[in-house]
Structure formats: structure tokens, C-alpha cells
Amino acid sequence: MISERTDGSLVIRTALPAETEAVAALHARARATYYPDGVPQADFDWTDAWRASLNRPDGRVLCAVERGRIVGIASFRTPDGASAATVKLFQFHVDPDHWRAGIGTALHAACVARWQADRRAAAVLDVHVDNRRAQAFYARQGWIPDPDNPPAEGDHHLFLRFAVPPRE
């Protein structure tokens, strides 16, 4: 899957295992923006987690590349126990230095095109409750609160659903 801006400055393609460290670094920069008290200590290594995602035969990681630099990432696959018609967007990040440049919208459109090609009917995700910027972005793209998965009291995530439009 490759898409490109009309000016040729942005390419969206499958991320490569050799790009694991760049992907993990972008993820860390983006994540740091929505934790008001600082990013919590993970009980696992994010670089290893991204390496596993990039090597999963049943998953996809797309990246947005601008002038040779990864500026956006999206990771998705069928969640465990879900129907093949549903895809879960596990990670979606744009480098904070590149916000409001249309990269997230282009990357989301590339995800939707892939989901359509894979004949997905719905996509789901969870977003951190403090990440208001992402919540607004997803709402603009057509995501709604998931009626099948309301947040539990004290949960730190909101669950959203997207109806994948049929392929034209």
C-alpha cells in the first residue's frame, strides 16, 4: 500500500522491521504529550513491542514518511477473539512536530483503504481519557463511542468504533 500527497512530500507505506527504533521513538514522543503527570513506567519494552508488531504476520504497521523521516505510524490487526470483519487500531501516532499538517488524516485514509481492501466492516480502538486531541481527531474521522464497550468506572480509556464504508 502506497499513497502519496500530490506534492510528493508524504508517502504512506508498510513500515519495515529495520525501522523499529524510529517507530518506537516517534511513539514515545507522541505518548508523552497526553500524560499530564508524565508517561507511566511500562512493565515491558516498547521497542520490543514494536519489533513484534512489525514482524506479526497477522498485523499491519503503516508509516507516513516525509522527506525520508517517519512522521506517523498506525498499527492494526484483528483483535483476539473478534470476528474477521473487525479490525482494531492498536496504535496511531503523528510526530508532535508535524501536527496539523494533514499527516494524521492521510494516514487514517490509508488505514481505511486497507480495511476496505481486507473487507472489514468495523474498526475499534481505545484512546486515553486525557488525550483530548486524539479524541477530537477521531471524532472528525467518524469514530463514535463504542456502544458495545462503555468505559468502566475508573477506566483510563474510552472505546471508539468506526463503521468502515464499503469499497466503491
Image: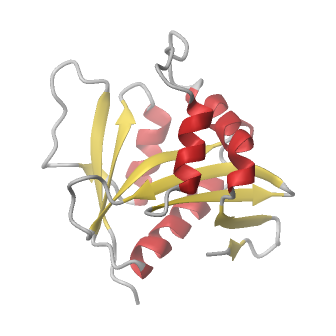
Identify the residue shown where x is 67% and y is 66%.
12
Quadrant of the frame with the N terminus: bottom right
Q: How many labels does the image show?
A: 0
Tell me if I can see residue 18 in this picture: yes
Q: In this view, does 24 lie above or below 162?
A: above
- Identify which residue is drawn at 82% across, 72% down: 7
The x, y position of residue 118, in whole percent, is: 40, 77
Q: Relative to 69, is 92 on the left or the right?
A: left
The residue located at (68%, 45%) in the rendering is 20
Horizontally, residue 1 falls left or right of residue 167, namely: right
Instruction: Please tell me which residue is depicted at 34% across the width and 79% down the height of the picture.
Output: 119
Instruction: Return the residue found at the far left.
Output: 148
Percent position of residue 126, x then y: 34, 41
Q: Residue furthest right?
A: 67
154 sits left or right of 14 in the view = left
Q: Where is residue 48 in the image (x, y as percent from the top left)?
A: 58, 36
Q: Is residue 96 above or below residue 147?
A: above
Q: Residue furthest bottom?
A: 168
Residue 91 in the figure: left or right of residue 146: right
| Res. 11 image quadrant | bottom right
Task: Look at the image and tell me whether residue 101 can be seen.
Answer: no
| Quarter of the C terminus within the rendering | bottom left
